[in-house]
Amino acid sequence: MPIHIAKVHDVLKGAPTHGTTILVDRLWPRGVSKEELQPDYWLKDVAPSSELRQWFNHDPEKFEEFSLRYRAELDDRDAEDLDKLLGEAARVDVTLLYGAADREHNHAVVLMEWLNETPLPK
């Protein structure tokens, strides 16, 4: 099934989403109330570890290394949230929601690529 990504603030302004909406940030997006944004799921444990997120600090120059480290975390992770994400992605279209300002250098981009390369459950 297709996997899409969308910036939370764009969705709040009316940008389209596809299928199941899943917030993939460890922290709730700043300045957004839970009444405004009502994703189908908030899967915190698919986000990068706090240590990796803090190391990356949204620095585009670190993005390539961040991507490698985050993929390694995903490959090694055994989390209920990750199982839920894989199950949804195998079943329906999914839109990964993220709060980062940078549209090109964020974990949702890496997660979408990783999901597209990972065999999904049947």
Image (spheres, rainbow, N blue to C red):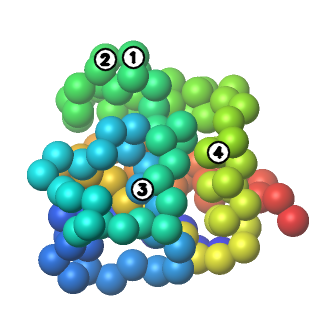
* Callout 2 secondary element: helix
Q: Residue at x 36, y 68 (%)?
A: 38
* Callout 4 secondary element: helix
Q: Is residue 43 left or right of residue 51?
A: right
Q: Residue at x 26, y 67 (%)?
A: 35
Q: Position of residue 33 (x, y in %)?
A: 21, 58
- Residue corresponding to mark 4: 82
- Residue corresponding to mark 3: 23
Whole-Å distance between the Cαs marked 3 and 1? Answer: 20 Å
Q: Residue at x 23, y 33 (%)?
A: 58
State if disc 1 and disc 2 touch (CB < 8 Å): yes
Three-letter amino acid code of the residue under disc 3: Leu
Identity of the residue furthest to the right in this view? 122
Three-letter amino acid code of the residue under disc 4: Leu
Viewport quadrant of the C terminus: bottom right
Q: Is residue 78 left or right of residue 67?
A: right
Q: Position of residue 88 (x, y in %)?
A: 66, 65
Nearer the camera: disc 2 or disc 4: 4
Three-letter amino acid code of the residue under disc 1: Glu
State if disc 4 and disc 1 touch (CB < 8 Å): no
Nearer the camera: disc 2 or disc 1: 1
- Residue corresponding to mark 2: 55
Q: Earlier in the sequence, mark 3 or mark 1?
A: 3
Q: Earlier in the sequence, mark 2 or mark 4?
A: 2
Whole-Å distance between the Cαs marked 1 and 4? Answer: 18 Å
- Residue corresponding to mark 1: 51
Three-letter amino acid code of the residue under disc 2: Trp
Snapshot quadrant of residue 62: top left
Q: Residue at x 18, y 57 (%)?
A: 32
Whole-Å distance between the Cαs marked 3 and 2? Answer: 21 Å
Camera-side residue: 74 or 40?
40
* Callout 3 secondary element: strand
